[in-house]
Image: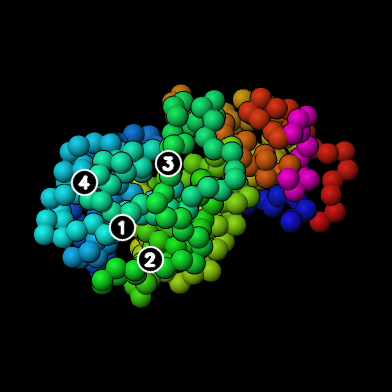
Amino acid sequence: MSTSAPGAHSGSNIAFRTEMNFDYGVATEVAPNVRRIVANNPGPFTFKGTNTYLVGSGDVAVIDPGPDDPAHLDAIAEAIQGERISHILITHTHRDHTDAVPALKERSGAPVLAFGETGKPRGARTTSPSGKAFVDLGFEPDETLKDGDTIRGADWALDAIHTPGHAPDHLCFAVVGERTVLSGDHVMGWNTTVVAPPEGNMTAYMSSLERMLDRNDKVFLPGHGGRIETPRRVVKAYLMHRKMRESAIYGCIESGDRFIPQIVPKIYGNLDEKLVPAAALSVLAHLENLVERGLVQCDELPPVIHSAFSIPPAAPLP
């Protein structure tokens, strides 16, 4: 556990890719043996919509069936005419990824595979970034996956990589032999990932990013947005961005700002009012991490959105 003070960083290296070539309901090959269908559920947290991926041919794995939208389910069925769904895989149990699971399971009879229970607190309504219940609390997979498990089909194999942070049960799926990773909401190219307590955890998220940096992947296929063709560069930029944000938040506390509503406008500037709750939760996630490392103290534990924060009288030794 680090006890050093946050370092100073300048400038962001994230070049967001907001263009995306797609048509709703149309399956498009985005990597060898991988097709993508974009669900028509655009929004400030879903970008153009949730990406559903079809891996393999003949026996097909469906990754993240998406929202409960009959048109999207019909698009999946149309894309796999003459084939069958052998597995339904879930990157994480946020409802924009899982609401279609019951209907797709009923149509296909395929087993649902996901990480399962984590023992972590899940998605309180009062702390949802969108102000809505966004965690599928009733979700139960048919089979649970753990880090390092391999799921196999006739002409494909996927390695499960546990990457908590955005959600405690988050999995990425690496296509064996292709240097391609379905990265879910862990790494996306169009924006930074929301890390919102208690569902999200910044300490876990940073560790998961470091883990992905150790890989030699060529392409990430995220849960929202287009292909990421320089994954290590993007992961490095994500890490730098988070360290810069941490440094700025620490500076606010150091200058006497004790409450998150004071910090948000200084960090984010003129932010769209709809995004202020998510920004406040992101600040809270960073502060949780700083408190855990002994660099910031809080008037209550665990910290919550209305807690008061300050610098400890005696800074910890580096």
User: Residue shown at 33%/54% (left/top)?
Assistant: 111
- Tell me residue 118's x, y (percent): 56, 48
Say what secondary structure mark 3 lies in. loop
- 227 left or right, relative to 23: right
Which type of secondary structure does the marked residue at label 2 adopt?
A: strand
Q: Is 126 left or right of 308, judged from the image as shown?
A: left
Amino acid at the residue labelled 1: His
User: Which of 63 and 42 lies nearest the eye of the viewer?
Assistant: 63
The answer to whether 211 is drawn above or below residue 17 in the figure is: below
- Label tally: 4
- 180 in the magenta segment: no
- Mark closer to the chain start, 1 or 3: 1
The circle on residue 87 is 1
Pair 2/4: label in front: 4
Question: Could you tell me if the residues under marks 2 and 4 are in contact, i.e. CB atoms within 8 Å?
Answer: no
Amino acid type shown at disc 4: Arg
**Colour scheme used in the picture?**
rainbow
Q: Label 2 near label 1: C-beta < 8 Å?
A: yes
Magenta range: 292-301
According to the picture, the residue beneath numbered tag 2 turns out to be: 151
Residue that carries the numbered disc 3 in the rendered image = 139
Q: Main secondary structure of the magenta part?
A: loop
Q: Which residue is mark 4?
A: 107
| CA–CA distance in space, label 1 to label 2 | 9 Å
Q: Residue at x 48, y 50 (%)?
A: 116
Q: Please tell me which residue is depicted at 46% across the width and 55% down the height of the picture.
A: 144
* CA gap, disc 4 and disc 1: 12 Å
